[in-house]
Image (cartoon, grey):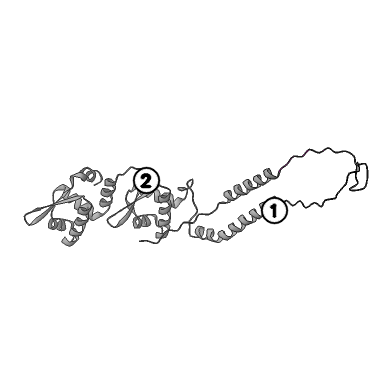
Amino acid sequence: MGPKNIRSTYTSTKLEKKLIFCLLFFLLTTTAEATEYIVSPFPSDQSGASINGEEVIELKDFTIYWQFLLWLAAVNILSATDMLLYPVKLIFPILGFQSTDHINVLDNLKRYSIYTHIKSRPGAYLSEITKKMSLNKGTVQYHLQILETHNKIEVYREFGKTRYFQNNSTFGEEEKKVISALQNTTNQRIISEIRNGRCNTNATLACEIGVSRATISWYVRNLKETGLINETKKGKNIIYSINPSYQNLVEKYG
């Protein structure tokens, strides 16, 4: 297994601004009051004097705008959180990465190039993409993870390799199997020779392709396990043939 991909999700600046605005709006609307006052001239210059002989008690004003203080505290907390996350956010841009959402998945030039390559070459695998894009393995893995997470591509594992296809329901499971097998040059030669009827035994295939019989046996065994090739015993020889269920797909992608 390759190194695990780690994705960090950050609170965006726009989200913070929206949160602060909503909190401020809530506090202002809950504290706003309308009171009707009737103002008339006070008959005396003495503060706290009675007008009609009633008892007057002077009260101290302890009004504290706690809502404003709460809002101020919220702003400070959000700012402190952003400051704590800033060093972590800074690491990814330095490495050439950027945070993404569903809107800008393909806005990244490297990611778009990887996606385009997979779209034009179904069944592409990691080392192939890395070589084609001239990028390091970690960067390609990161962008592949983003594309998979946002359902732009799908993963298919066969013949010990992880391959990638465009996620648009274009390819069925049998198609993926045939395409993946034909990505390998030796598999392609073996299937081609068997289809043409020129070579259909281990010995003749080894001679025609120019590899050892043990090598042919290894490739043929994999093709049999996936169901692309059938074998029948004829005397001392084992004859290989294309599975009729995959005949049309082999001709289509072969």
The x, y position of residue 238, in whole percent, is 11, 55
- Mark 2–mark 1 Cα distance, whole angstroms, equals 51 Å
Q: Is residue 245 magenta?
A: no
Residue at the spot 56% in from the left edge and 59% down from the top edge: 85
The x, y position of residue 98, in whole percent, is 49, 54
Instruction: Check residue 167 in the rendering and tell me which mark sits there, or answer none.
Output: 2
Q: Is residue 35 magenta?
A: yes
Q: Nearer the viewer, mark 2 or mark 1?
A: 1
Residue at the spot 26% in from the left edge and 54% down from the top edge: 184
Numbered circles on residues, count: 2
User: Mark 1 or mark 2, which is nearer the start of the sequence?
Assistant: 1
The front one of 244 and 210 is 244
- SS at mark 2 in the image: loop
Instruction: Check residue 69 in the rendering and tell me which mark sits there, or answer none.
Output: 1
Instruction: Check residue 88 in the rendering and tell me which mark sits there, or answer none.
Output: none
* Residue 226 in view of the camera: yes
- SS at mark 1 in the image: helix
The x, y position of residue 95, in whole percent, is 48, 60
User: Magenta segment range?
Assistant: 32-37
The front one of 196 and 72 is 72
Crowd around label 1: few <14 · some 14–19 · many ≥20 (10 Å)? few
* Residue 212 in view of the camera: no
The front one of 184 and 41 is 41
Residue at the spot 6% in from the left edge and 55% down from the top edge: 235
Which secondary structure class fits the magenta region best?
loop
86 sits to left or right of 208? right
